[in-house]
Amino acid sequence: MKKTVSLLVISVYSCLSLFSQERSIPVDTTVTTQHSVTVNGATFSYTAETGTQPVWDELGKPIAALHYTYYTRNDVKDRRSRPLLISFNGGPGSGSVWMHLAYTGPRVLNIDDEGFPVQPYGVSQNPYSVLDVTDIVYVNPANTGYSRTIPESGKEVDRSKFFGINADIEYLAEWLNTFVTRHNRWRSPKYIIGESYGGTRVMGLSLALQNQQWMYLNGVIMVSPADYKVLRTGGPVSDALNLPYYTAAAWHHKALPASLQGKDLLEILPESEDFTINTLIPALAKGGFIDQAERDRVAERMAFYSGLSKEEVLTRNLVIPTSYFWKALLRDRGYTVGRLDSRYLGIDRQIAGERPDYNSEITSWLHSFTPAINYYLQEELKFKTDIKYNMFGPVRPWDNDDDNTRDNLRQAMAQNPYLNVLIQSGYYDGATTYFNAKYTMWQVDPSGRMKDRFEFKGYRSGHMMYLRREDLKQANEDIRAFILRTQANGKSAKY
């Protein structure tokens, strides 16, 4: 009997493969399910809506279908005053999975308290989710997650409409206008949160939503933000700003001199930051014309604050690439350290070399996130599809030209007295370092007249600082406090 059934199934699938439609995702659809969660000791029910909403061209023709997941708390009597948090990840090309299933949402991965994978894979309740104080929508930009351009590939796809800093901002702002209208959220206080490249995205969206969609925000939250005015640009400032991160990572691995290692992390970071701003940047600005005695003094202090040797610093002309640091810090122990989170260790083919063979942290994260998001969306939220969930989607080449996002945020804040900014970073993040994030914050408003509307929070973990249980709790509490503090409560929007 089993053999007959098996043959029948094979036969049916063979026939279907001959006549079935192309594999595709619905352009415009929703699936709604009901759930409950206990947050900070209080249990409440919520609705999860997951589906797709089109991106239209100028003629009203759908050119992409964006997948999203939208959570609303059920016992809210007046949703006019209920905040809405709009969440993006980064990449560019990353699905909106990381913060969704590990940070702010009502479910979190099955991982240990430091963020490492455990089996069986899956999710559990998030007791620290901010769903108690805000509704949340997680958005997958084109070609990430289940989102796709229409058609998915080929010459008919106008890549210039999606895959670049300014194109990305423009179509997402338009998409959000439709989403807010469909869900009747125009009166709600609104917040946008973006991680990594999502930091660039939300800086740009803050002004695009105001000036193109007439949608005003109460807050912008940047998690481990990538600022392309600093990252990968080279030069004295860009090269120097990595040093405080080196100090943090070396401290974590007990690789600093005893006089530093004996102090708490938050005691030594201000020393490293002060040296970076007041000594290292001016020294690097002198280039090859720096006095030899000064070069030696600077190299010695860099070695002191980085866990590397003075010789390593001198032979690299006082500029230590992050890739070299990840390879060299624990070379004597036979390990590399992770790029996005230097708490993670890797093993290379050979101990010698200038950069690690692989990113130990991202392989660990994909290990746990990939099965969890596929299980969760299809089995718990009931969104059934044969489309692959793109953890990282095909979005490159990406157009980074005309990046004015930092000034976009400044202008949005100047125009909107309600708009405040929260920046969250992990000290052990070597990709978008915490001191880069601080520097971005300092540079947004050169006048300094809006600096009281910025807030920075640091955590003892990496790029996805929320993977560490202690930081998951604190970082959510920081968002919760930020949202509660920045609601207008009847106050007029004026200076």
Image (cartoon, rainbow, N blue to C red):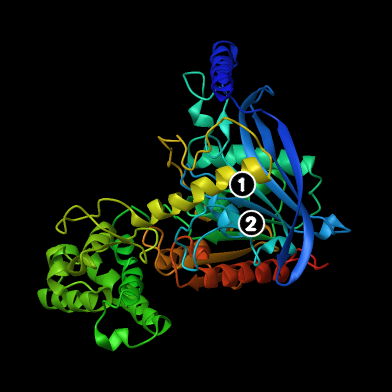
Q: Residue furthest front?
A: 1
Q: Residue furthest right?
A: 77
Q: Provide the residue designation for mark 2.
A: 107
Residue 316 appears left or right of 129: left
For label 2, count other residues whose C-alpha is less than 10 Å away and answer few (under 14), some (14-19) or many (20+): many
Residue 272 appears left or right of 25: left
Q: Label 2, label 1: how many angstroms apart (C-alpha)?
A: 9 Å
Q: Quadrant of residue 10?
A: top right
> Residue 246, image x and y in percent?
31, 70
Query: Residue at the location (48% across, 52% down)?
Result: 368
Q: Provide the residue designation for mark 1.
A: 376
The correct choice, above or below, for 180 with respect to 162 in the image is below
Mark 2–mark 1 CB contact (< 8 Å): yes
Query: Residue at the location (49% across, 28% down)?
Result: 159
Query: Residue at the location (45% across, 55% down)?
Result: 226
Question: Which mark sits nearer the N-terminus, 2 or 1?
Answer: 2
The correct choice, above or below, for 24 with respect to 293 in the image is above
> Residue 359, image x and y in percent?
33, 53
What is the secondary structure assignment of the residue under circle 1? helix
> Which is nearer the eye, 314 or 15?
15
Viewer can see residue 448: no
Residue 9 appears left or right of 239: right
Residue type of the residue flagged with mark 2: Arg
Quarter of the picture containing the C terminus is: bottom right
Quarter of the picture containing the N terminus is: top right
Query: Residue at the location (17% across, 69% down)?
Result: 332
Label drawn at residue 349: none
> Residue 464, image x and y in percent?
48, 60
> Residue 128, image x and y in percent?
64, 67
Q: Quadrant of residue 316?
A: bottom left
Residue type of the residue flagged with mark 1: Tyr
